[in-house]
Amino acid sequence: MVQGGIAAAIALVGLAACGAVETINVSDGKELVAAVGKILDIRKANRDTPVEVVLAAGDYELPLSLGLYEGKTFISSSTAPVVFRAAPGARPRLCGGRVVKRWRRTSFNGRDDVWVADVSAFRLREQLSLFFHDGRSMTLCRRPNADPRHPYSGGWSYVRGKAVSMYKPIEGEREDEIAVKPEDWVERSHVAEGRVNIFPRFNWWNSIERIASYDPASSTLKLAKGIRKGYAPRPCDRYCLMGYREDLDSPGEWYHDVEGGKIYFITPDGSDPNAKRTAILTNGSPMMRLQCVTNVVVKGLEMCEAAAAVLADGADRCEVVACAIHDMGFNAGSAVTFSGTCCAVRDCDVWNTGSYGITVNGGRSAYTPDMRDLNVVENNYIHHTGLMNRHGFGVQVRGQGSRVSRNLIHDMPRGGIFYSGRFLTIDRNRIRHVNLEMEDTAAIYGGGYVNNTGTHITGNWVSHSIGFSRDKEGEYAFRKTFAWGIYLDDCSGGATVSGNLVDHCNGGAMHMHCARFNVVSNNVFVSNGGESSMPRQFSIRGWRSTDTGMLKNYLLTAAQRQYEELIAASPDWTNFPALAHAPKNPDAPGGLLMQGNRIVNNIWYYPDQPQSLLYGPANYNASNNVFDANIAWGGPGGPKLRHEYRNMTLDMWRARGQDRSSVFADPLFKDPAHGDWSFREGSPAIALGIAPIHPEQAGLYVNENRKTLPVEAEGVREHPEWLQASDPPPGRGI
């Protein structure tokens, strides 16, 4: 049963167990909105009356939020729920868009397959960001066009200039200018109507900004406002232009003429748009807004065409269950966001979102070590998020004591699960084919000096963390490096990583970036060498106390501020090893911050990658970190090792107190080619006490809400050609 979920218990035993149920039947959006007032009247008479709002099949127009505000439009009960659910056998669809009708064919940009509709009645003052056709998000016209043959590596222009390292500090950089190659610019009738979608400087984030002007003399775009500080566009950064009328030239694209009050559209298949639902999103509101409410359940609904499906603040024991949530969201927020305690998102399908899929936060301003949020994200199928914000992970979890379990996540521009906090459980998730557009990333990513204490990452099956990175010449390619399976970043400490299967992640199974006081044990890491210039199975690198630049700034500013806030809530935090010392004055024996890590009882199996390094720790204090009792097998010849950027023999490594009882031999899996990772008789794993892992338990399961497992959506697994670089290779700013 879901942790802390009275609402979950009610879902199992039935509303009738709470007493007489008031049922409100609705069949359209107006009746659904009116139901909120009826609930309030019922609760004014008896706040502990359970209520169900039953939605018949059909489309429900919700151009404004359905708002449940405690004490204003809603009265909560700790014992009796309010359930919004589908009628038996029905799949009602909630639509937040405003319908656009009366399309007519017109000539536009020399094409005769363009349709136009008048939207002046909506009195729109700015260019729209979202337009929907048949329940799907369409593409705002762009240059270059999206490349269906290379959906991740193609369809980009590149900032003019010679490539420079994204890590190199440069004085005087401007965050509000982009140097454009002259051949990438065409004359515009209205320069300021356009936007640019760019991956500025660091190849792990994109930003969508409005354009103010273009200077033809210097071939420079001026932005209406600067990109975030420190993210100045640099030569070879990827970008595309969006929203210009001159660029409407491809099926599935649309253009909004704000001054003329019209939308121009080329349907994906050449059909008449009047035959299907078309809609625009005229506001940034969620479909349902829950404010400080308790015991509300949303079940069995389809939700689309909105900024978000459900946004809850200060919620307690609320749930979204068995819903289909898709084609919504801008470049911020999530399709479902819960800030509160004992809330759950379960058994849902989430796809085609603008940013993140699901976010759960504790919503507390301060935490003591005994506090737990007990939020749950379980048994959800999440894919193809981040349509606008390419940082959009499938799940984001923050706070303390929440759980992300048994989800299936795949085909992400960045990773599967992004977390921060303490005492979190991330277990038995199946994550595959992620990080298709970025680098310095992972399928499961978490970091920060004050994060990770008490967190368990266990029983997950992670594979094919791909990575899309740029070389020193500015040329992009897949499978270079810096895309790991699990990533403990930025001095985070106190986690346990165990029982996971990580395979075919191109940067390595894990990266521990100055991680402290973590235990990595009983994992199986398979063929994670990638295709970089120096492939390695496992990555671990620390910081020196004398390092300057980004490290020093982080420790003295953000990390120190977060640490002070945590200690102010409870000095007891200093009893945890990773939190015993402040970031501005860290414990750094021998001048090395990374310490207290135990990497034991793991198996590395990579006989198909014999040239790969096993690992090559750097800024690694061998006196207070340890590898031991592991098994590694990359074929005959023994492991390739490095320490502090120097090659070394196994004897040299063991002389440093590392891997002294480890075995470098075939672990004798029963049938690894067919996913049987148990051990044959005589396996050295048995003598070392390594337990078999169970990846078959990771991912979705069948229950009363998910009657069958879904047919998985097509992606790069089905289309490996999408992971080929465009021809010519993408990149080069000159």
Image (spheres, rainbow, N blue to C red):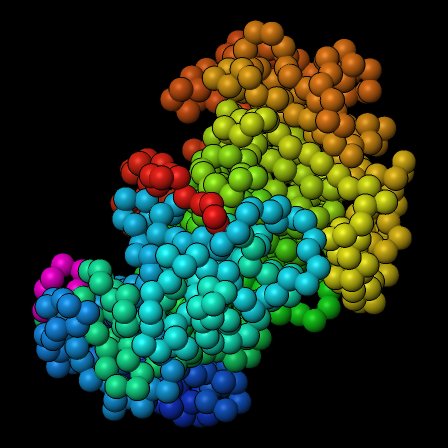
> Residue 588 or 705: which is nearer the viewer?
588
Query: Residue placed at 69% from the left, 41% from the top?
Result: 513
Residue 282 vs residue 560: left or right? left
Q: Quadrant of residue 685?
A: top right
Magenta stretch: dominant secondary structure: loop
Query: Residue placed at 70% from the left, 53% from the top?
Result: 169
Residue 355 vs residue 265: left or right? right
Tally of numbered discs: 0
Position of residue 572 relative to residue 569, above or below, is: above
Q: Residue furthest front?
A: 217
Residue 382 vs residue 337: left or right? left
- Please provide percent x and percent y for residue 575: 85, 51
Query: Residue placed at 53% from the left, 89% from the top?
Result: 71
- Please provide percent x and percent y for residue 336: 45, 66
- Please provide percent x and percent y for residue 124: 33, 86
Position of residue 609 relative to residue 303, above or below, is: above
Q: Which residues are magenta?
A: 267-272
In magenta segment, residue 2: no
Residue 158 vs residue 139: left or right? right
Query: Residue placed at 57% from the left, 39% from the top?
Result: 472
Q: Looking at the image, can residue 93 be seen?
A: yes
- Please provide percent x and percent y for residue 136: 26, 64
> Residue 62 or 344: which is nearer the viewer?
62
Q: Looking at the image, can residue 501 be seen?
A: no
